[in-house]
Image (cartoon, rainbow, N blue to C red):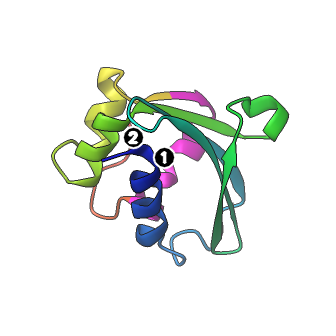
Amino acid sequence: MAADDSINELKKRFNAEAARNVTATYLLNVRGEGAGSWLAKIKDGQCEFIKADGNGGANGADCTVSIDAEDLDMILAGRLSVMTAAMSGVLAIDGEIGLAMQLVPIFFEGQGPFI
């Protein structure tokens, strides 16, 4: 699955109720097929994805999550848990771990937390 397709899948999975009290901007760096960076701006139970230039500081990201497209596809398909990906270094987090943990119920309902 190309990175654009993975981002579209995340858009479909967005759980507005889980994001009700979250206000954060995440930079998602996807490497590999269709590589790219997207800002996910979450506020008041809504999420907006914006194609980014990959520079989290300039884009005002509170937390950066980096992963290969192939590994993200495995997570989306349920073949790899977010927790396992984070603990094994497959998924890299830069910034507040607490903010990254909030992504699990927002996009990956049913998977355990990052740590």
Q: Which residue is mark 2?
A: 114
Task: Locate the C terminus and report the quarter of the image it occupies.
Answer: top left
Q: Nearer the viewer, residue 101 or 89?
A: 89
Q: Residue at x 63, y 35 (%)?
A: 96
Q: Which residue is mark 1?
A: 101
Horizontal and vertical percent position of residue 41: 69, 57
Report whether 81 appears left or right of 61: left
Residue type marked 2? Phe
Badge 2 element: loop
Q: Residue at x 73, y 32 (%)?
A: 56
Horizontal and vertical percent position of residue 75: 27, 46
- Residue that sits furthest to the bottom in the current view: 17
Residue 8 found in image quarter = bottom left
Horizontal and vertical percent position of residue 108: 36, 59
Q: Main secondary structure of the magenta part?
A: helix
Residue span colored magenta: 93-107
In primary-sequence order, the first of circles 2 and 1 is 1
Residue 5 found in image quarter = bottom left
Marks 2,1: beta carbons within 8 A? yes
Q: Residue at x 23, y 43 (%)?
A: 74
In the rendered image, the vertical position of residue 39 relative to residue 109, given as above or below: above
In the rendered image, the vertical position of residue 3 relative to residue 55, given as above or below: below
In the rendered image, the vertical position of residue 81 relative to residue 105, given as above or below: above
Q: Residues within 10 Å of mark 2 (few under 14, many from 20)?
A: many
Q: Say whether residue 101 is magenta.
A: yes
Q: Residue at x 27, y 62 (%)?
A: 110
Which label is found at residue 23? Answer: none
Q: Say whether residue 96 is magenta.
A: yes
Residue type marked 1? Met
Q: CA distance from mark 2 to mark 1?
A: 5 Å
Q: Residues within 10 Å of mark 1 (few under 14, many from 20)?
A: some
